Image: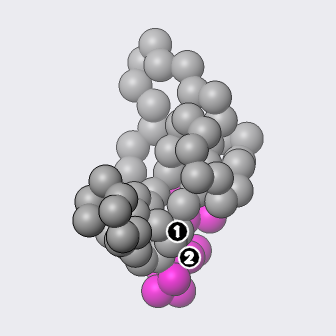
Amino acid sequence: VPIPSEIHPPRAGETPEGFWVIIVGQEVGVFYRCGNVQKRYPSFQEALSAYMVKYDEGRVRAALLPGGAFW
């Protein structure tokens, strides 16, 4: 589970589709492309803030899925 300070905004020249926060799943964090969508935010800062709230509440956790990429 990444701590909030390990989550960085998109690199220069990278055009994100949006910002999605995943707080429970095989990969958790703030993502820039659609996948298993939890909730989309209009900006990186809003997404990181939402992640930090859940992180501080202890609600962010990695959850392996049987047969998944990290199983």
How far separated are the C-alphas under marks 1 and 2? 7 Å
Query: Is residue 2 among the parts visible in the rendering?
Result: no
In the rendered image, residue 41, in percent from the top left (x then y), is placed at 71, 48
The residues colored magenta run 45-59
- Circle 1 sits in a helix, a strand or a loop, which is it? loop
The circle on residue 39 is none
**What residue is rendered at 65% in x and 35% in y?**
18
Q: Is residue 5 above or below residue 8?
A: below
Query: How dense is the environment of label 2, judged by Cα within 10 Å: few (below 14), some, or many (20 and up)?
Result: some
In the rendered image, residue 1, in percent from the top left (x then y), is placed at 33, 69
Specify whether 41 is left or right of 60: right
Of 4 and 15, nearer the camera is 15
In the rendered image, residue 55, in percent from the top left (x then y), is placed at 47, 76
Badge 2 amino acid: Lys
Depth check, mark 1 against mark 2: the one in front is 1
Residue at mark 2: 54
Asked if residue 51 lies in the magenta stretch, the reply is yes
**What residue is rendered at 56% in x and 35% in y?**
33
| The image quarter in which residue 17 lies | top right
The circle on residue 23 is 1
Residue extending furthest toward the top: 13
User: What secondary structure characterizes most of the magenta part?
Assistant: helix
In the rendered image, residue 31, in percent from the top left (x then y), is placed at 50, 44
Query: How dense is the environment of label 1, judged by Cα within 10 Å: few (below 14), some, or many (20 and up)?
Result: many
**What residue is rendered at 40% in x and 69% in y?**
65
Which of the two discs, 1 and 2, labels the residue nearer the N terminus? 1
Badge 1 amino acid: Ile
Of 12 and 24, nearer the camera is 24
Query: Is residue 61 among the parts visible in the rendering?
Result: yes
Task: Mark 1 and mark 2 in contact? Answer it, CB < 8 Å.
Answer: yes
Asked if residue 28 lies in the magenta stretch, the reply is no
**What residue is rendered at 56% in x and 76% in y?**
54
